[in-house]
Amino acid sequence: MFIILYAISNIDVKKYEKMMTAVGDFFGSPKVVDLQTEIMKDMSAPAGTLKDELERLIYENNYAASIKLEENDRGITIHIMENILFPSGSADLAFGSISVLGKLAAIIKTLPNDIRIEGHTDNIPIKSSVYPSNWHLSVARALNTAYNLIEIEKVPADKVSIVGYAEYQPIQPNETPEGRSLNRRVDIVIIKKAK
């Protein structure tokens, strides 16, 4: 046993395989684990969970004030605040948002999960020639975010859907400016795969 542990600790693959064959023959099981394959699997696997990867991305890029994560029965929701994506009252992606979405897409597009892009506003009515209501604005923001992810970042289009909620799914009360700023957002929902 000590010899086996020594061989593994030095990752001497050939020595390990010989020892395991000998032990396996003795105990009536000639099966040998391919240590080299197992090591390569570990090296190629993502470090930690999806949430860990997203949290690391947020931390390393100083996005903590503008991007929040939530994990629930639906899956993982990435709340992206208006201030990092859009000018006030607009659905045109701001210049800096392209970099943010690119970094998120690098993780998202490797996943097998369906992705839902959800647009949200606060409860202050908007009336303009372009967006006659918060419904219009929330859908336009979701659509432009999804279109960027699909066309620019190459997230598979068949996995993406959009929805606009206007002011009807706030994450904070709309009574304060701070609460309203958190409600003006786009959510990227990574839908949990059914077991």
Image: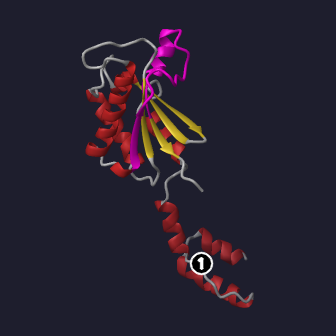
Disc count in the image? 1
104 inside magenta stretch: no
Farthest top residue in view? 176
Q: Residue furthest right?
A: 27
Q: Quadrant of residue 29?
A: bottom right
**Image-quadrant location for residue 141:** top left
Could you say which quadrant of the image residue 126 lies in? top left
Q: Is residue 124 left or right of residue 154?
A: right
Residue in view at x 47 percent, y 15 percent? 180
Label 1 sits on residue = 33
Judge whether residue 156 can be spotted in this image.
no
Does residue 167 belong to the magenta stretch? yes
Report the side of 71 relative to 134 (left or right). right
Q: Nearer the viewer, residue 90 or 129?
A: 129
Residue 84 drawn above or below residue 19: above
Colouring rule applied to residues: secondary structure
Residue 33 seen in render: yes
What amino acid is at disc 1? Val
Local crowd size for mark 1, using a 10 Å CA cut-off: few (<14), some (14–19), many (≥20) = few
Residue 110: x and y, percent? 41, 53
Q: Dividing the image into 4 quarters, which one contains the N terminus?
A: bottom right
Is 34 displayed left or right of 101 in the figure?
Answer: right
Q: Residue 98, position in %: x, y?
A: 29, 34
Residue at (63% x, 84% y) in the render: 31
Judge left or right: residue 61 versus residue 173: left
- Residue 123 placement (x, y as % from top left): 46, 14
Q: Quadrant of the C terminus?
A: bottom right
- Residue 154 at x, y = what percent? 30, 49
> Where does the magenta region start and end?
159-187
Secondary element type, mark 1 = loop
